Every structure is written in C-alpha cells, then in structure tokens.
C-alpha cells in the first residue's frame, strides 16, 4: 500500500513538472515568434532600403557618365581651339627665331 502512495506522489510531482516545463516552453516560443517577426520586419526594411540605395547609386553613375561626356566634349572643343591657336604661336616663334639668325 505504501508503494502505491509513493507512485501516486511520483506521478503527481511528474505531472506538475511537465506542466511547468510546458508552460515555460510555450512562453519561450511566444517570445521567439515575436522576435522572429521583428527580425523579419527589419530584414524587409533593409531590403527595401538597399533597393533605394542601389537606385541612388545607379542615378549617380548615370550623372557621372553624363558629366564625363560633357567634360569630354568640352575637352575636345578646347583641343580644337588650342590646335587652331597653337600653329600661330609656333609660326611667330619661327619668325622671331628666323630673324635672329
């Protein structure tokens, strides 16, 4: 009879322990789900912001290319103007150099 009472006490204590462990596990899982939702929201925001950053970088690259093309056109124009002016300078130097001889 005494062993039957010990078995009943053992099962009662085991049941309480299992219920407490289950309750703690449920609470931990609820917090884990909340944390994962927050992480998912943060990751979604990071993806959106990185898309915006990539668009800005592409726009910056396009602007730099256009500015480079303008600079190239200006440089070509300056070279053309300087090539027209440069032979005149050389001929003056030659004329001055020729009169010194």
Image (tube, rainbow, N blue to C red):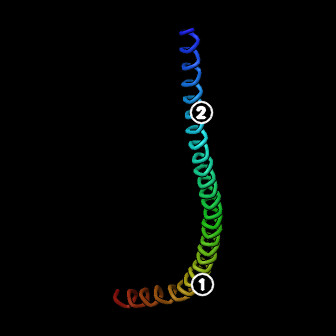
Provide residue 75's location: percent of width, then percent of height: 56, 80
Who's the residue at 56% across and 42% down the image? Answer: 28
Q: Is residue 44 left or right of residue 92?
A: right
Frontmost residue, 88 versus 54: 54
Q: Quadrant of the C terminus?
A: bottom left
Mark 1 neighbour density, 10 Å: few (under 14) some (14–19) many (20 or more): few
Mark 2 neighbour density, 10 Å: few (under 14) some (14–19) many (20 or more): few
Per the image, label 1 sits on a secondary structure element best described as: helix
Provide residue 78's location: percent of width, then percent of height: 55, 84
Provide residue 12's location: percent of width, then percent of height: 58, 24
Provide residue 57's location: percent of width, then percent of height: 60, 67
* Mark closer to the chain start, 1 or 2: 2
Q: Picture quarter containing residue 67?
A: bottom right
Q: Is residue 45 shown above or below 95?
A: above
Frontmost residue, 8 versus 74: 8
Q: Nearer the viewer, mark 1 or mark 2?
A: 2
Mark 2 — residue? 19
Mark 1 — residue? 77
Q: Quadrant of the N terminus?
A: top right
As measured in the structure, the alpha-carbon distance from the residue carrying label 1 to the one carrying label 2 is 86 Å
Q: Picture quarter containing residue 5?
A: top right
Frontmost residue, 95 versus 64: 64
Who's the residue at 59% across and 20% down the image? Answer: 11
Q: Is residue 24 shown above or below 73?
A: above
Q: Is residue 87 shown above or below 24?
A: below
């Amino acid at each position: 009879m005494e062993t039957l009472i010990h078995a009943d006490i053992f099962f009662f204590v085991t049941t309480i322990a299992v219920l407490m462990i289950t309750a703690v596990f449920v609470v931990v899982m609820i917090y884990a789900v909340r944390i994962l939702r927050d992480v998912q929201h943060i990751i979604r925001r990071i993806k959106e912001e990185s898309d915006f950053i990539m668009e800005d970088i592409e726009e910056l690259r396009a602007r730099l290319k256009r500015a480079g093309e303008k600079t190239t056109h200006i440089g070509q124009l300056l070279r053309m103007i300087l090539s027209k002016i440069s032979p005149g300078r050389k001929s003056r130097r030659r004329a001055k150099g020729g009169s010194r001889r």
